[in-house]
Amino acid sequence: MTPPPESDAPDTARLQKLQALLDSLSAYIEQYHGGAVRFIALEGTTLKVRLEGACLGCPLSPNTLHGWVEGTVRQFFPDIERVESVDLPPTPPAGAAA
């Protein structure tokens, strides 16, 4: 019997923990600053997120991204070496015309 092929897909439980951490950070950012941070992807040792709301265009968003989000993520996930902000178009509400 041959062993199953190695998978490069991140562990589901780990992704859930990472998502929960980002959700907690985002809840605080939403409550006190009017912005948000959303998980986009985990590619190797790079976490890709999207800053939303008041974070868009804010001159302090690099501080939020690297000082706060990246610093917190790396405390709990030390193997994540980098956090990047990805500019994606917002997702239209369900039922909206494209």
Image: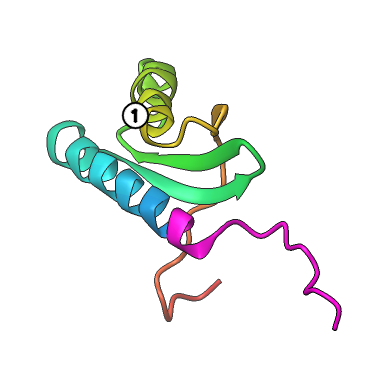
Q: Is residue 9 magenta?
A: yes
Whether residue 86 appears in this view of the structure is: no
The image shows residue 76 at horizontal and vertical percentages of 37, 35
Residue lying furthest left: 32
Q: Is 19 in front, or is 10?
A: 10
Q: Secondary structure at mark 1?
A: helix
Label 1 CA crowd tier, 10 Å (few <14, some 14–19, many 20+):
some
The image shows residue 84 at horizontal and vertical percentages of 55, 32
The image shows residue 83 at horizontal and vertical percentages of 52, 31
Which residue was labeled with disc 1?
72
The image shows residue 86 at horizontal and vertical percentages of 57, 39
Q: Residue at x 46, y 54 (%)?
A: 14
- Identify the main secondary structure in magenta: loop
Q: Residue at x 27, y 39 (%)?
A: 25
Amino acid type, mark 1? Thr
Image position of 36 with respect to 60: above or below: below
Left/right placement of residue 8 relative to residue 66 reads: right
Q: Residue at x 40, y 70 (%)?
A: 93
So how many labels did they put on this image? Answer: 1
Q: Residue at x 55, y 39 (%)?
A: 47
Q: Quadrant of the C terminus?
A: bottom right
Q: Is 30 in front, or is 14?
A: 14
Whether residue 43 appears in this view of the structure is: yes
For the record, the magenta segment spans 1-15
Image position of 37 with respect to 32: above or below: below
Q: Is 96 in front, or is 10?
A: 10
Q: Quadrant of the N terminus?
A: bottom right
Colouring rule applied to residues: rainbow
Left/right placement of residue 83 relative to residue 37 reads: right
Residue lying furthest front: 1
